[in-house]
Image (spheres, grey):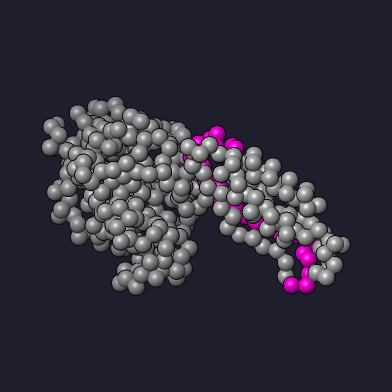
Amino acid sequence: MTSNQFASLPDFKDKEAELMRTRRHLHANPELSFEERETAAYVAERLEAWGYEVTRNVGGHGVVGRLKQGAGGRSIAIRADMDALPIVEETGLPYASTKPGVMHACGHDGHTTMLLGAAEYLARTRHFTGTVNLIFQPAEEAGKVSGAQAMIADGLFERFPCDAIFGLHNHPGAPAGSFLTRSGPLMAAADTATITITGRGGHASRPHLAVDPIVTAANLVMTLQTVVSRSVNPTETAVVTVGTIHGGTASNVIPERAEIAASIRSFSPEVRKTLEQRIRAIAAAVAEAHGATVDIDWEHGYPVVVNAPEETAFATEVVTELVGAENVSECPLIPGSEDFAYFLEHKPGCFLRLGNGEGSAFLHNPKYDFNDASLTTGAALWARLAERYLQA
């Protein structure tokens, strides 16, 4: 097959309206992490109608569609996430969420639609030799125990072997239909530290008889701001943000306890380890200096998304062929996290970013909406990537 025979944007021109209807149906019917029953059924039924070998309930409501063609021995996996967020939608769109307090504020409706678009094309044209595994993943937004972890634990890669895995996320602020790629670390590891400070309660008028955990917490919040600036190499990137602080119920009472919670982001295992060591040490030292004690609940979240060099070079080549070099750029490091990282710990692959429009609302914003102008671009990408990877 010559290069101009691979899937291209014009191949999906007549699918624009259908993809838009699919995306808006999914947008109007969002489901939270681990509750994606209707979405999974919708995906599975479509894949089955197109001739895929479909496996349901992989790691919860995960769906895997498998399509074999020819005698090729290579196999590829492409993943889309399906879950929504607990956010009250404020878009005012005619296809806005019909479920109060739940909306697709991260674009997973678009991700699912694009992979379905590619699935239909690949089943109809079959211009490849090998095996395509399409992974529709639940619970990317779950945090502590995510859908990627659940699918892997359910034997994803043993049951559906692949040589490489690819995925993408939409990128507000970048032009619709453009791509951002980056080899190596792309998105951050995300950990959470909940620090409970125990002092000795007392009357506000007699602070000398108490050990004030609120003063201790206030000092700790400020001291934690030195962790990145004084314990991490300036050429590295890290974030420590204290997002909550709670303590006390009345102005004339010194409470027994106070609690702070911090989000910690890093782009390498070494920096991640350093951040935990320094935060634990600083919390203990500040508490001791004030006569208090401290207990830390450290939750290790998603690891760093690390794109493999070979697969990233391949994906960059494919998107450049698809949309032109002027619409492909290097992606900056993204402090947000993504559970696609777990897949990349098991298989080489690449996670891409697809522009959602320069005027797009931010992700996880009640006014966010996936840009339908990117649907055919994403569908064409996945079709072309699969064909190129499994070319005869």
Q: Residue at x 42, y 46 (%)?
A: 334
In the image, taking residue 48 as reference, residue 34 lies left or right, namely right
Res 384 quadrant in image: top left
Q: Nearer the viewer, residue 231 or 158?
A: 231
Location of residue 207 (image quadrant): bottom right
**Is residue 376 shown left or right of residue 167?**
left
Q: In which quadrant is the N terminus drawn?
A: top left
Reply above or below: 141 against 67.
below
Image location (x, y in percent) of residue 201? 81, 63
Q: Nearer the viewer, residue 313 or 379?
A: 313
- In this view, the residue in front, 242 or 170, is 242
**Looking at the rendering, in which quadrant would you find the C terminus?**
top left
Give me the residue at 48% from left, 37% from top: 235
For the view shown, which residue lies furthest in the right direction?
A: 209
Q: Quadrant of residue 95?
A: bottom left
Give the magenta-colored segment's residue range: 251-274
Specify whether residue 110 is in view. no
Residue 194 in the image: x percent, y percent? 65, 52
Inspect the magenta stretch and tell me whether residue 165 lies in it. Answer: no
Question: Residue shown at 36%/62% (left/top)?
Answer: 361
- Is 269 contained in the magenta span? yes
Can you see residue 378? yes
| In the foreground, 214 or 261 | 214
The spot of residue 352 in percent (x, y) is 34, 43
- Above or below — where is 373 with respect to 348? below
User: Where's residue 238, x and y in %?
Assistant: 51, 44
Q: Which residue is drawn at 73% across and 46% down?
A: 284
